[in-house]
């Protein structure tokens, strides 16, 4: 992305000299006075301002003081041949001046100063640093951000995604590692709570973009206009509620990765705009006159079947193929019961630390009950269950008595159903309840292996699958020969 620098000077020669030096690296907008500069700021997204101190209509400090209150994001610099202490103090205290550039200026030193200002702008957008911190040295901000990214890289490494050696998640992680090596769009599908964002972060921090920003947006949480503003940016007054300039997340993520969660919830109208951004690698902030080039890797996620959405006409086919260059599917927790003890142990350790408890572990019968449960909320539901159990438990191990009823009774033999007249259930209902319980128990013992369960029960694989569908049993079923 090429940064935009606004240069303000009422001397035409000085203005042209500054433009000539800076235009090789930056998009330069020139204004001959403060009034023209304000008009530029009303219509353009600006990263840095270089303003002469001595101007006829108002001083540079007076102008930048107004800019600070109205457009706080651009990094502000003064260029001056004078060094009155009052001006320097006013510049720092009132206008939030990042740096003075003394006349006569040297081209190389001027470029270094503006480069530092632009880098500071980018770092502050990524870390949401307050505008009052504009006078901090870019080196200091860079060091802090680098340290945070290094810690994030360790925290979100592929190896930190908890799974058993025989888990179906292992193949997904291996594919994710391969995808991370290449600058390819990734679409992650799977139910809510399966860890799609965790996989997206691992892909980012395992890629060559790990040194840049990872930005997240939930596309299902906002109406079109606000979502467009969040992603592409907007100028103040571009629509009702746009009270200030906003730098879009695509621009914040320049050089890095943007994670578009719940992409299947977007409207067809917004999909057209997103498709153009992906095709052209450029954005136009709402209310702005110019487009901006961006270099962003897109990782999208959805809990919908996007291919079905495409067939139904609710999702654009061309956008789908743009996003799904490398599709990955996160299996539900019920499809990988072998992972539950490992995930539960990790969650318990985190909850112990957060709540200041010292619960030693999880009892075996408790884990068995957990592995029988369907976990429709997936890992999020498991986390909530363990948090609740830790609150209820005494020191020692988490016991099955502390489980919620829906988890403790999962897979238990069904109570005999009652007929409409209140009489006991028929023999057919009792047999079905027993059959369902036997299948559920065998699935639990064999880790969901269809072939082994069918062999034990004397059924064919097809026959077993028919019964699974009939009784709506979905406990850890995996295909295996």
Image: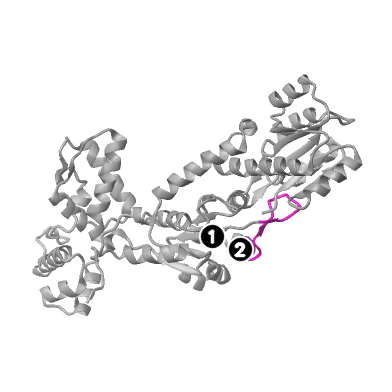
The image position of residue 329, as x and y in percent, is: 39, 65
The image position of residue 262, as x and y in percent, is: 48, 57
What residue is drawn where x is 60% and y is 53%?
254
Asked if 87 appears above or below 407 in the picture, the reply is above
* Residue 30, quarter of picture: top right
Disc number for residue 264: none
Task: Please give the range of residues in magenta.
Answer: 273-293
Asked if 247 appears above or below 358 in the picture, the reply is below
| Secondary structure found at label 1 | strand
Confirm whether residue 74 shows in the render. Answer: yes
* Residue 430, quarter of picture: bottom left
Tell whether 303 sits left or right of 223.
left
Tell whether 190 sits left or right of 401.
right
The image position of residue 471, as x and y in percent, is: 21, 67
Is disc 2 in contact with disc 1, using a CB cutoff of under 8 Å? yes
Q: Nearer the viewer, residue 127 or 205?
A: 205
Whether residue 283 appears in magenta in the rendering, the answer is: yes
Disc number for residue 298: 1
Q: Nearer the viewer, residue 23 or 27?
A: 23
Q: CA distance from mark 2 to mark 1?
A: 8 Å
The image position of residue 145, as x and y in percent, is: 52, 42
Q: Assess disc 1: are there few (<14), some (14-19) or many (≥20) residues with their C-alpha within 10 Å of its C-alpha.
A: many
Residue assigned mark 2:
278
Q: Nearer the viewer, residue 60 or 57?
A: 60
Asked if 313 appears above or below 164 in the picture, the reply is below
Tell whether 480 sits left or right of 169.
left
């Amino acid at each position: 992305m090429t940064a935009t620098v606004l240069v303000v000077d009422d001397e035409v020669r000085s203005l042209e000299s500054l433009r000539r030096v800076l235009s090789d690296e930056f998009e330069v907008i020139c204004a001959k006075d403060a009034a023209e500069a304000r008009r530029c700021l009303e219509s353009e997204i600006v990263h840095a301002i270089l303003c002469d101190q001595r101007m006829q209509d108002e001083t540079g400090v007076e102008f930048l003081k107004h800019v600070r209150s109205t457009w706080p994001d651009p990094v502000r610099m003064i260029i001056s041949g004078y060094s009155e202490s009052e001006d320097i103090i006013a510049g720092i205290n009132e206008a939030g001046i990042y740096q003075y550039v003394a006349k006569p200026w040297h081209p190389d030193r001027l470029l270094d100063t503006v480069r530092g200002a632009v880098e500071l702008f980018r770092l502050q957008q990524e870390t949401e640093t307050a505008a009052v911190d504009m006078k901090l040295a870019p080196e200091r901000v860079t060091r802090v951000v680098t340290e945070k990214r290094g810690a994030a890289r360790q925290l979100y490494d592929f190896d930190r995604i908890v799974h058993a050696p025989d888990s179906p998640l292992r193949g997904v992680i291996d594919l994710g590692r391969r995808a991370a090596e290449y600058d390819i769009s990734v679409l992650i599908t799977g139910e809510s709570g399966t860890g799609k964002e965790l996989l997206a972060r691992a892909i980012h921090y395992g890629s060559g973009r790990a040194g840049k920003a990872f930005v997240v947006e939930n596309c299902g949480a906002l109406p079109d206009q606000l979502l467009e503003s969040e992603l592409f940016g907007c100028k103040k007054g571009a629509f009702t509620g746009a009270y200030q300039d906003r730098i879009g997340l695509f621009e914040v993520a320049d050089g890095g990765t943007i994670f578009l969660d719940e992409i299947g919830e977007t409207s067809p109208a917004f999909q057209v705009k997103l498709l153009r951004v992906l095709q052209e690698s450029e954005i136009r902030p709402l209310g702005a006159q110019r487009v901006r080039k961006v270099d962003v890797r897109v990782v999208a996620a959805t809990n919908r079947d996007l291919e079905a959405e495409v067939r139904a006409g609710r999702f654009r086919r061309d956008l789908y193929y743009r996003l799904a260059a490398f599709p990955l599917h996160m299996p539900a927790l019920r499809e990988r019961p072998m992972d539950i003890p490992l995930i539960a142990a990790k969650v318990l350790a985190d909850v112990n630390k957060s709540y200041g408890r010292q619960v030693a572990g999880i009892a075996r019968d408790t884990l068995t009950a957990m592995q029988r449960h369907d976990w429709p909320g997936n890992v999020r539901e498991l986390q909530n269950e363990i948090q609740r159990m830790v609150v209820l438990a005494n020191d020692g191990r988490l016991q099955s008595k502390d489980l919620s009823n829906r988890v403790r009774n999962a897979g238990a033999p069904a109570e005999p159903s009652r007929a409409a007249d209140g009489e006991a259930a028929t023999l057919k209902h009792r047999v079905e309840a027993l059959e369902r319980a036997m299948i559920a128990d065998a699935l639990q013992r064999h880790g969901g292996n269809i072939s082994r369960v069918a062999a034990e029960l004397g059924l064919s694989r097809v026959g077993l699958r028919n019964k699974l569908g009939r009784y709506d049993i979905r406990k850890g079923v995996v295909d295996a020969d």
